Image: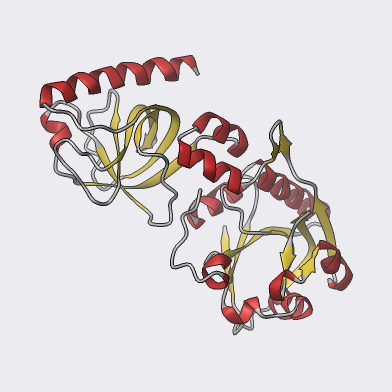
Amino acid sequence: MRVITISTSSTLKYNKPMCACIGYFDGMHLGHQKLVRETVKMAKEKACESALITFDPDPRVILQGKASIRHITTIRQRMNRAVSMGITNIVILQFSREMSQLPPEAFVKDILGQLNLKGMVCGFDFRFGYRGSGDAAKLKEIAGFDVVTVDPVKDENGKISSTRICELIRCGDMLPVRKMLGEWFQIEGTVIHGRHQGTGIGFPTANVKYSEESLLPRTGVYAGYALVGGRNYKAMINVGHNPTFNYKERISVEAHLIGCDRNLYGKHIILSFAVFLRDEKQFRTKDNLIMQLEQDVRNTEKVLQEI
């Protein structure tokens, strides 16, 4: 994988011919995957390299003045998913106020013109240039390369979109999320030390240092999976403040890996959220908490076997 960074001040001239798709691609859901597949196909037909063009930061940070925005996938996750589907180049447009004010013609000439594009794949609703004044039809008109527009991917509830997926994640409704993403919703990060309260009651947990960019699901307990060190474990995952013995102001994400007795500190871990089990709650005694955790483990194994 090659990462290419372009800004309004860069003067890159990437000479190798390339076919690319363009968008923010939050979630890399089935609609985004359709664009990627079409791009890889076009690149093979034209004997070109393939590329995914995305933006950093999220354009809404600049256009709407938002300090930070939570995303279904971090930029690293989006890049990895694209590469797994056959993309060989990731082009990151460093989005700025200056870039947002470029008219469509200047965006194509000065920004996309730093690449040797032979083809572009975009969604039916793609907009670019100052105040979104350019669309797919405009791109076809002014581009010196082939442009293919991809229709939306729909399910029984309408167009698959990042907005719909975000709403479901915030509600903890993970099964329809999986259908639209093509995989489980995931949060990843490094396993860090906590206060070891779980170990003391027989339920050690892997505390995850997740990205501040990551969208957090509804607080509570989930059945899911944990991939760490090349092994996949069934996992009971907790998202919340740990109100009984270990209250934290910052929402913690931690998982009890069923059947795992390895030292995981410092390792990269990927948590997959499958089924919401219950809300987080405060227990009066340690024994009551242990009884609930034992039940949570049984429920985790049961629901994962059922799905």
Q: Position of residue 120 (x, y in %)?
A: 78, 61
Q: Position of residue 196 (x, y in %)?
A: 14, 39
- The residue positioned 59% from the left and 48% from the top of the image is 163
Q: Quadrant of residue 234?
A: top left
Front position in the image: 119 or 156 = 156
Of the 4 image quadrants, the one containing the N terminus is bottom right
Relative vertical location of residue 179 with respect to residue 4 in this rendering, above or below: above
Q: Is residue 195 left or right of residue 182?
A: left
The residue sitting at 19% across, 46% down in the picture is 193
Q: Is residue 14 visible?
A: no
* Residue 31 against residue 143 in the figure, above or below: above
> At 50% from the left edge and 19% from the top edge, which residue is drawn?
307
Q: Position of residue 33 (x, y in %)?
A: 67, 45
Left or right: where does residue 170 sit relative to residue 26? Answer: left
Q: Residue furthest right?
A: 141
Q: Nearer the viewer, residue 297 or 164?
A: 164
The reply to whether residue 241 is in sight is yes
Q: Is residue 7 above or below residue 217?
A: below
Q: How is the image coloured?
A: secondary structure
Q: Nearer the viewer, residue 132 or 145?
A: 132
Viewer-closest of 53 and 288? 288
